């Protein structure tokens, strides 16, 4: 079924960028987000209960080990920047592994 969504320009651009990073389509990204939002947290499948837990909004999150310090936003951004740089280098140099 087709429908029209009126989204803010910045949100649409972020969604399109995320879809490209994940090597998927905007349609698939929106569908996944809607399904995740609609289904109750109790129905979320946990592929690895030793590593993950289902958060209050039905989103999988990594279990924190007892005594471990919380991950900061700066650490997450640093890791994402490293991943983005690796992706860029692979795109610029496709012959390298």
Image (cartoon, rainbow, N blue to C red):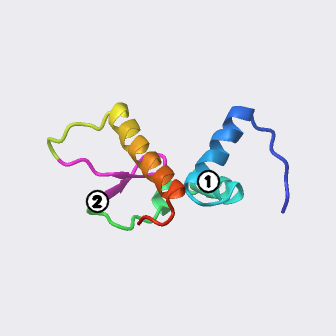
Residue 45 shows in this picture: yes
How crowded pointer 2 is (Cα within 10 Å; few <14, some 14-19, many 20+) is rated as: few
Residue located 49% across and 62% down the image = 43
Mark 2, secondary structure of its residue: loop
Residue 50 rendering spot, x and y as whole percentages:
26, 63
Mark toward the viewer: 1 or 2: 1
**Residue corresponding to mark 2:** 51
**In the depicted view, which residue is nearer to us: 24 or 86?**
86
Q: Is residue 29 left or right of residue 2?
A: left
Residue 24 is one of the magenta-drawn residues: no
State the separation of the CA atoms marked 1 and 2: 27 Å
Is any part of residue 58 visible from this angle? no
Give whichever of 95, 60 is nearer the camera: 95
- Where is mark 1, residue-wise? 20
Counting residues from the start of the chain, the first of labels 1 and 2 encountered is 1
Above or below, 81 against 41 in this view is above
User: In the rendering, at what x and y percent does residue 19 appear?
Assistant: 62, 53
Residue sitting at 28 percent across and 51 percent down?
63
- Quarter of the image where one finds residue 80: top left
Circle 1 residues within 10 Å: few <14, some 14–19, many ≥20 = few
Instruction: Examine the rendered structure and indicate whether residue 49 appears above or below residue 58.
Output: below
Q: Which residues are magenta?
A: 52-65
User: Which sits in the foreground, 22 or 2?
Assistant: 22
Quadrant in which the C terminus appears = bottom left
Locate the N terminus and report the quarter of the image it occupies. Answer: bottom right
Residue lying at 32% horizontally and 33% vertically, measured from the top left? 72
- How many numbered marks does the figure carry? 2
The answer to whether 14 appears left or right of 79 in the picture is right
Mark 1 lies on a secondary structure that is helix
């Amino acid at each position: 079924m087709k429908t029209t969504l009126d989204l803010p320009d910045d949100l649409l651009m972020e969604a399109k960028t995320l879809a490209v990073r994940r090597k998927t389509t905007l349609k698939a990204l929106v569908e996944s987000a809607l399904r995740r939002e609609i289904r109750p947290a109790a129905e979320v499948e946990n592929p690895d209960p030793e590593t993950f837990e289902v958060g209050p909004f039905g989103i999988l999150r990594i279990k924190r080990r007892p005594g471990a310090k919380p991950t900061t936003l700066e650490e997450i951004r640093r890791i994402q920047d490293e991943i983005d740089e690796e992706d860029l280098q692979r795109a610029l140099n496709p012959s390298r592994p």
